[in-house]
Image: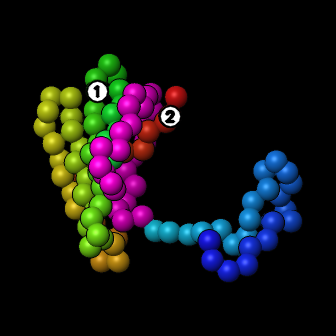
Amino acid sequence: MKGEVVINPRTKAPENEIMPQAKTKGVRLDLKPLPGAKIINFRNPAPNQFILNYELESAVHSIHYGWDHKGNYNYEFVNPDGTTTESTYVRNNLDRSNLKTDCTFMLIDVV
């Protein structure tokens, strides 16, 4: 955080929050939720690189994602049969109006 922050007078302990809140924009559009999915593993194998495994309808799916020092964000969605879908986004160059993806999953309920 940078600058002066104060406790939001509309919230009471133990849920106090500070004002202003930090803000950011995603580098890609949200994908549809996955009701019933369970996160079964999450790893950080290298700096700025992550692997999330989840189970949906008894099948294990993986999402490999990360970013580099140039602001390139890479996503690889691995299906249970081993097929993959890859997408790369660049921060600040994302034209949300024309963004299309053939990925059909991402948001997961944590159980």
Q: Residue at x 78, y 50 (%)?
A: 15
Task: Let me know if residue 60 is in the magenta part.
Answer: no
Front residue of 52/103: it is 52
Which mark, residue 60?
1
Q: Residue furthest top?
A: 58
Quarter of the image that includes the N terminus:
bottom right
Front residue of 30/45: it is 45
- The amino acid type, in three-letter code, at marker 2 is Val
Disc 1, SS = strand
Could you tell me if residue 94 is visible in this image? no
The quadrant in which residue 44 appears is: top left
The quadrant in which residue 2 appears is: bottom right
The answer to whether marks 2 and 1 mark residues whose Cβ atoms lie closer than 8 Å is no
Reply above or below: 36 against 3.
above
Q: Residue at x 21, y 39 (%)?
A: 78
Counting residues from the start of the chain, the first of labels 2 and 1 encountered is 1
- The amino acid type, in three-letter code, at marker 1 is Val
User: In the drawing, does residue 61 fall left or right of residue 12?
Assistant: left
User: In the drawing, does residue 22 fall left or right of residue 70?
Assistant: right
The quadrant in which residue 68 appears is: bottom left
Q: How many marks?
A: 2
Q: CA distance from mark 2 to mark 1?
A: 15 Å
Which mark, residue 50?
none
Disc 2, SS = loop
| Residue position marked by numbered label 2 in the rendering | 110
Q: Dot 1, crowdedness within 10 Å: few (<14), some or many (≥20)?
A: some
- Where residue 31 appears, x then y in whole percent? 37, 50
Write the start and end of the magenta stretch as one range. 26-49
